Amino acid sequence: MVELMIKNEENKTVKTSAPFIGEGQKVFEKNTVFQSKNFNLWYGDHHALKDINLDIKENEVTAIIGPSGCGKSTYIKALNRMVELVPIVKTNGEVNYRGRNIFGSDYEVEELRTRVGMVFQKPNPFPKSIYDNIAYGPRIHGIKNKKILDEIVEKSLRGAAIWDEVKDRLNQNAYGLSGGQQQRICIARCLAIEPDVILMDEPTSALDPISTLKVEELVQELKDNYSIIIVTHNMQQAARISDKTAFFLNGEVVEFDHTDKIFSTPRDQRTEDYISGRFG
Amino acid sequence: MKYMNDTVVMKRMKSRLQVNKVWKTIFIIATSVALLALIVLLVRIVTQGTGYLNWDFFNNFGSRFAEKAGIKAALVGSIYLMLVIAPVSMILGVGTAIYLEEYAKKNKFTDFIQMNISNLAGVPSIVFGLLGLTIFARMLFLGKSILAAGLTMSLLILPVIIVAAQEAIRAVPKEQREASYGMGATKWQTITRVVLPAAIPGILTGSILALSRAVGETAPLVVLGIPVILQFLPDGLLSEFTTLPLQIYDWAKRPQEEFQFVAAAGIIVLMVLLVIMNSIAIFIRNKFQKRY
């Protein structure tokens, strides 16, 4: 462990292979939401993320692809420090959210997660009514006024394109909904805390194709107001919905670029092998 | 070459089925023994005791005369005792379970605590009686009061409640906690709004079953020197009192035959009390069980 850390310190100055935005794509500069600088993460002795350098811009959909065990889920869970629920996790390097290191000692994890919402792989509504599910976030942040809560619930459900399907049964248990509806309830629940960034960890892997399509359309709509980072094992999905794509392999970022570039003219041979289905 | 020769297989079939039948019979006998013992016990007690079950039995204090003996003091004492045990053991037990499951880091120290709690559940109740006598009765000068006995009994069932509550808390899926933490909820908010609502049926079931064990327990009370016959009702937590099992014990050891019948009547009351408590536990479990 000690040896690895020293090595990283040395590499810091040498390492310039940080992924960039593709050349010739001069667009106006968007603000960076997440900036990872030589970020490393270990599960015990397992070095799960190695020197990650990534700049994630606002109001974009950033897809993270890669084979199983490449660290893509670990990375997204590091962005809201959800990885810390695993007791043996150690990190070094920086992940800056809007310029502030989220692993800094003065950063309260509750504050971070209020700004950076998350949608999980398996739909995980609470065993409560649809209304209480959506109102959960606002309530924990101290909103008690019934009228305001009503408004937030409606706005969030509309935002997640599920209002029309559930408006007549807001008091019914969310478990009565289909898997696809549950996942959109979870997205609505995430919108209710009005986050800045939405992290999505393979949000459609447990859903049927039609529900998947609905969630994908939703992601497209949401990016006008939110920055979205989505982990997916489905390359077509990444190609369909994302603006930029990062390809992870064995805990490293192999390539990060505009999605159309990644899928048409990848610079790295390994990226090409992966997207053309030669492994993974 | 076929390995499964039909004639050989058929020949073996018979003996396999036979062995199966033999074991099935053994298990049925094993079950019947327990069942039979229970039936004999119940029949004996009910036939002996029902004659003495009337209003006077509930309304009379203990007496030298079997016809006048009643369980008023014992029944009220048992209920008072429960009123001390239930809040004390549940607050301490659930608090410990929450700490161990949600807050404590997994390390050698918490492993050590965990192991000791599990072991405590197996410590004989008389040992808890001695502990109660030393600490509550003597050091804290609580004597033979309801409070002293209640605290002793709380310690006795604490390990059972802790383990039951831990299991109930552990059964709440981690996805539920993640959802809550993911929205910026604190640990406390997650515990009160997500974990406990889902775990409470399990916690209550375990607690009620533990409580019914405490209600039927005698040994620690004997050690504490709780009187077996009282002619008055307790008037507070520091008052002397007696309980159903103690009263039954006293009647059962008397030489006169009539007192055996009085004891049987007392046992019926105690059993009905325990059946009611266990039914409540089962009702809560079935009614509030959450599915994920």
Image (cartoon, coloured by chain):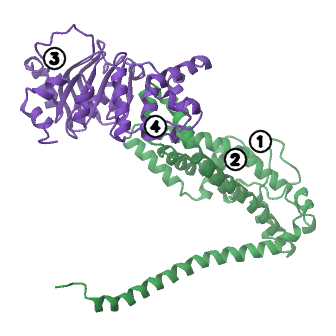
Chain colours: A purple, B green
Same subunit: marks 3 and 2: no
Asked whether A207 or B11 is in front, the reply is: A207
Could you tell me which secondary element the residue under label 1 belongs to? loop
- Label 4 environment density (alpha carbons within 10 Å; few <14, some 14–19, many ≥20): many
Residue beneath disc 3: A21
- B131, above or below A234, in the image: below
* Res. A254 visible in picture: no
- Tell me the quadrant of the picture where the N terminus of chain A can be found: top left
Q: Which mark is residue B150?
A: 2
- Disc 1 crowd, CA 10 A, few/some/many (<14, 14-19, 20+): some
| Chain of the residue displaying label 3 | A
Name the chain under label 4: B
Badge 4 element: helix
Q: Residue at x 79, y 72 (%)?
A: B46
The residue to which callout 4 is attached is B176
Between disc 3 and disc 2, the foreground one is: 3
Nearer the observer, disc 1 or disc 3?
Answer: 3
Residue B16 relative to residue A274: left or right: right
Measure the C-alpha gap from mark 1 to mark 3.
Answer: 75 Å
- Which amino acid type is marked by label 4? Gln
Q: Which mark is residue A224?
A: none
**Which residue is painted at 76% across and 52% down in the image?**
B78
On the image, the x and y values in percent for residue A67 come to: 20, 39
Residue at image coords 62%, 53%: B210
Q: Secondary structure at mark 2?
A: helix
**What residue sits right under mark 1 in the picture?**
B237
**Residue in the image at 46% along x and 41% along y:** A178
Callout 3: SS: loop
Mark 2, Cα crowd under 10 Å, few <14 / some 14-19 / many 20+, is: many
Q: Work out which quarter of the rendered image holds the C terminus of chain A and state it.
A: top left
- Looking at the image, do the residues carrying marks 2 and 1 touch, with CB atoms under 8 Å apart? yes
